[in-house]
Amino acid sequence: MKTISLQDAQSLPIWRRPVTLLFLMAIAMPLSFATWSALLNNFVIEVAQFDGSDIGWLHTVREIPGFLAIGVILVLLVMREQVLGLLSLVLLGVATAVTAWFPTVGGLMTVTLLSSIGFHYYETVNQSLQLQWLPKDRAPQVLGLLLAAGSAATLVAYVLIVMTWQAFDLSYNFVYMVSGGLTVAIVAYCALVFPQFESPNPQVKKFILRRRYWLYYALQFMAGARRQIFTVFAGFMMVEHFGFEVHHITALYLINLVANMLIAPVFGRVVHRFGERRALVFEYVGLVVVFVLYGGVYWFGWGVILAASLYVIDHMFFALALALKTYFQKIADPGDIAPTAAVAFTINHIAAVFLPAALGYLWLVSPAAVFGLAAAMAGVSLILALMIPRHPEPGNETVFSALAPAPAE
């Protein structure tokens, strides 16, 4: 496969440039992952007879590869980031395709582990490639467009599920096979059409932890812990508490997707205009309110309309996570992006390894307490976000940087 520099790649036709590859990968990933997620809660309850504890353990297993994402650094010793990203997508697609073949706790945990390795290694490499390939002055806007593109692709899949699930009496196996197969097909196209792109800044291929990135690490840790509660329990609540069926939960996902398509590019411009600090403060204040209201569904018996509305609003806030990426892009040494992406992904998943299983037991006692804990986590993230300076850059990573010289590495 021909290797070409990023500068020379700008002379290629648009359909062979790096940004186009990023868009195709952004489309390929959610075709498998989002479809898997949309069907999962119904599949495990209706077919595998899961309870709250089982779903918690399944998501703990799913997050183990995220915790081990630091292993990407070792893989990159023998493989280019671009190649690893495509191979990871293939693993995700194949594992998603065969999910319905294993309708037991043990079988689902095994295939989920494999798909999760693909997902988390792809996400680690993809974040690194985005920050290397996108110029700093355009990164927030393009990241917003990439989010919208992924949402648009998934929208097509979800519309088809909603329209055909009952009409044609579709099976879980058929939908999983089609979604996983489409991901593999897109990867095959990418492997054949695109050259290997060479970043101008060679990446450090060793484990690094820099003191000056401490705030970024802390924000990643809290984001990972908080995200688990939404990912694991918000959708589970809609099925268990309100009795949502496959086409109901998928319709809710559809609303999320349309909202993301509209709001993600706007959020990209917002981050560019107002900065990472204000964007993240807005996100975390909103999440505190959302999680407290989630608890009210159980404390006060609030109805399905409010719960569904909170689910959509909660999901929309995830689009602002691009501000965390661009904050790091601004403070990072160019050669640190790949290894720090791997380290940050591992930090992001520390809580994810034990939190779903532990909260699965708490869920059996008090679902409202789970959401109360999430609100507290969002509050901690808010405090951390207030430590981001208005104009982050190397040497000005936090609001405290001006008070003392940067510590030695």
Image (cartoon, rainbow, N blue to C red):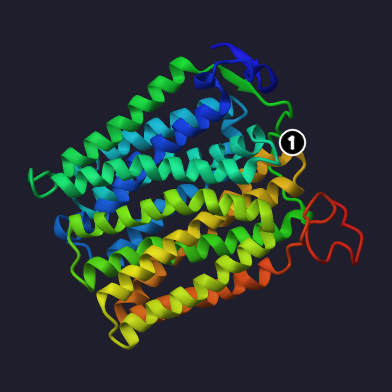
Q: Horizontal and vertical percent for residue 295?
A: 38, 80
Q: On the rendered structure, is 331 left or right of 300?
A: right
Q: In this view, does 405 lie above or below 157?
A: below
Q: Is residue 342 above or below residue 212?
A: above
Q: Horizontal and vertical percent for residue 153?
A: 36, 39
Amino acid type at circle 1 is Gly
* Front in this rendered view, residue 258 or 307: 258
Label 1 crowd bin: few (<14), some (14–19), many (20+), radius 10 Å: some
Residue located beneath label 1 in the image: 335
Q: Horizontal and vertical percent for residue 110?
A: 31, 46
Q: Horizontal and vertical percent for residue 149?
A: 44, 40
* Residue found 38% across the figure and 63% down from its top: 312
* Residue found 66% across the figure and 51% down from its top: 272
Residue 114 appears in the figure: no
Residue 213 appears in the figure: yes
Q: Is mark 1 on a helix, strand or loop?
A: helix
* Residue found 26% across the figure and 68% down from its top: 238
* Front in this rendered view, residue 104 or 335: 335
Quadrant location, the N terminus = top right
Q: On the rendered structure, is 220 left or right of 261?
A: right
Q: In this view, does 165 lie above or below 242?
A: above
* Residue found 39% across the figure and 60% down from its top: 231
Q: Which residue lies furthest to the top in this view?
A: 2
